[in-house]
Amino acid sequence: MKSNWRVYTKKADFKAIGERFGIDQVMARIIRNRGLETDEQINMYLNGTVDDMHSPHLLKDADKCVDILTDKIQAGKKIHIIGDYDIDGICSTTILYKGLKAAGADVTFAVPDRIIDGYGINEHLIDEAYNNGTDTIITCDNGIAAIEQIKYAKEKGMTVIVTDHHDIPFDYVDGEKIHKVPQADAIVNPKQEDCPYPFDKLCGAGVAFKVIKILYEKCGLNPAWLEEYAELMAIATIGDVVDLSDENRVIVKYGLKHLAVTTNIGIRALVEACELEIDKISSYHIGFVIGPCLNATGRLDSARRAIELLLTTDMEDARNKALELRTLNVERKDITEEYAAIAIEQVENTELKDDKVLVVYLPDCHESVAGIIAGRVREKFYRPSIVITKAEDGAKGSGRSIEGYNMFEEISKCGKLLNKYGGHPMAAGISLDIDKIDEFRKGLNENQTMTENVLTPTVWIDVPMPVDYVDIKLIKQFEKLQPFGKGNEKPVFADRNLTVRQSTVIGKNKNVLRCQLESEHGKLVTAIRFKLDGQEIPEVGRKISMVYYPDINEYNGIVSIQFRIEDWRYV
């Protein structure tokens, strides 16, 4: 798919920034491109530590929440956690459970069943907790949109605390957005309009971590015990794909570093089951190996299994549970591949191909993989995509969006057709009656205002940089930019008028392109592109422009520079 190439044009005194922080001017430009302007922000980005993280006391209701919890603990009241079935919910539930246990709480937890309960707290889970003598419910990674459910719990005389990070729900009244929040006893969510916390992009586990940090302070518990929770917060931050900026970036760097010496037996067993080395875990391994295994439990079974893995203190038990998670993830992959192919075929061969917002109905697909398949459809066609499956009480769907289309706000405009919905600008979940699917699809497409420019993927180039400028010293500086992810994307560069001297397809599956390119100044470089998937091969002798990322290749003791081709076109 053809993409737009655009170069960041943010201005600054890059030479001065480079001199102040001891970095190359190219590094200074990349950092400025990430929206960092002040010396304080740049220093936090390059050198931030956990000591630079924002005070949890700035979170609205955080102290009130802990006051309630400590009163309940001292009174011997039963506290019940209701989490979520994804990686963020799994990690935040574990943090709250272990933290409350350490403080002496009589605490239990529940995770909704994806099929039976759906997302978040509901009347069934409330009744179950009430019948077990629960006095207080605390949510994590959910609850902010549970207006009626929390009202139901309050009518039963229960105390309810919400810890969440999702967008605040709203209604459109005469074209104006009117936010609404549940009537809980305390709500800890940095996205609240009147919350003074300076960073609103924490994941659910991040919010839970902040609450437990205050609890530890108030109870006089050893702050060193928080290290394990920081590791879980880092895993959730990567897995939930929140912005790797500000303190999220700090906690991921810190958490990944400490995973090498983690005391959590479950994490160690899962790393072993995935055949990884614990002292070499990167954000990639969390996002694409460890995370999917944790998520697979909530998709095909119960997320309780993942939480029990993270809570176990028996190594043999941990190894058995970890192998079960890996097996579930293999099963999840097979289901995903099968139905992603069906979804793509449906778009290509029906009237859906003319829609700008893709709504695909796969009645027989397991609803747990709908979001992953929506992501595949979006990737294939670069359009906002929602995959809907048949559920026990109608239909459920999960959507993935593109830049420039706020999916949460857009589905809110069709909220009257839905039984339940929630999410973010880039992702959303819905439930609706089957007979309203077509009307919902039409409504989204009639309301959308996307231009062709929005519907064309954009490659943002950090610096137009000749390949001649790149050396190993510069590439090693780029390590300071890691970890990469949403909000801190891997930088890309561009060079033009490169002459193709060799062009070969290699690899077991003949899916890797290797080129030898000559710069305008006569320098020969090696460039490689992975996952060709039928893409065009540049012809020898022709000139191309290339978008690239340089890295270091080590083979048989020989160290060389290799340019990874992100995109290319003929000059």
Image (cartoon, rainbow, N blue to C red):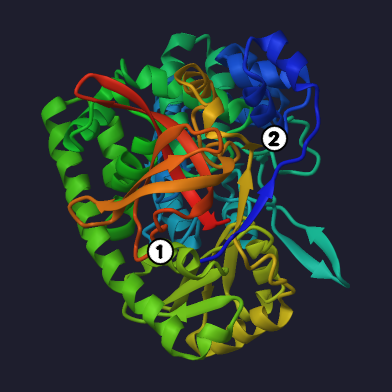
Residue kind at label 2, given as amino acid type:
Asn
**Disc 1 packing (10 Å; few <14; some 14–19; many ≥20):** few
Return the residue nearer the eye: 60 or 357. Answer: 357
Q: Going from the N terminus, do you reach mark 2 or mark 1 first?
A: 2
Q: Which residue is mark 2?
A: 33
Asked where in the image residue 94 lies, by quadrant, the reply is top left
Q: Say what secondary structure mark 1 lies in.
A: loop
The residue shown at (43%, 42%) is: 517
The number of numbered badges drawn on the structure is 2
Q: Percent from the top left, x then y, of residue 410?
A: 69, 69
Return the residue nearer the eye: 251 or 403. Answer: 403
Residue kind at label 1, given as amino acid type:
Glu
Asked where in the image residue 291 lies, by quadrant, the reply is top left
What numbered label is drawn on residue 536?
A: 1
Vertical arrangement, residue 39 with respect to residue 295, above or below? above
Whether residue 516 appears in this view of the structure is yes
Q: Answer with left or right where residue 422 lies relative to residue 344.
A: right
**Disc 2 packing (10 Å; few <14; some 14–19; many ≥20):** many
Quadrant housing the C terminus: bottom right
Q: Percent from the top left, x then y, of residue 162?
A: 60, 43
Q: Percent from the top left, x then y, of residue 563?
A: 43, 37
Query: Mark 2 to mark 1: distance in Å?
Result: 31 Å
Whether residue 392 appears in this view of the structure is no
What numbered label is drawn on residue 3?
A: none
Q: Percent from the top left, x then y, of residue 323?
A: 15, 42
The residue shown at (67%, 41%) is: 185
Vertical arrangement, residue 79 with respect to residue 128, above or below? above
Q: Mark 1 and mark 2 in contact (Cβ < 8 Å)?
A: no
Q: Nearer the viewer, mark 2 or mark 1?
A: 1
The residue shown at (64%, 38%) is: 462
Q: Answer with left or right where residue 133 lies relative to residue 485.
A: left
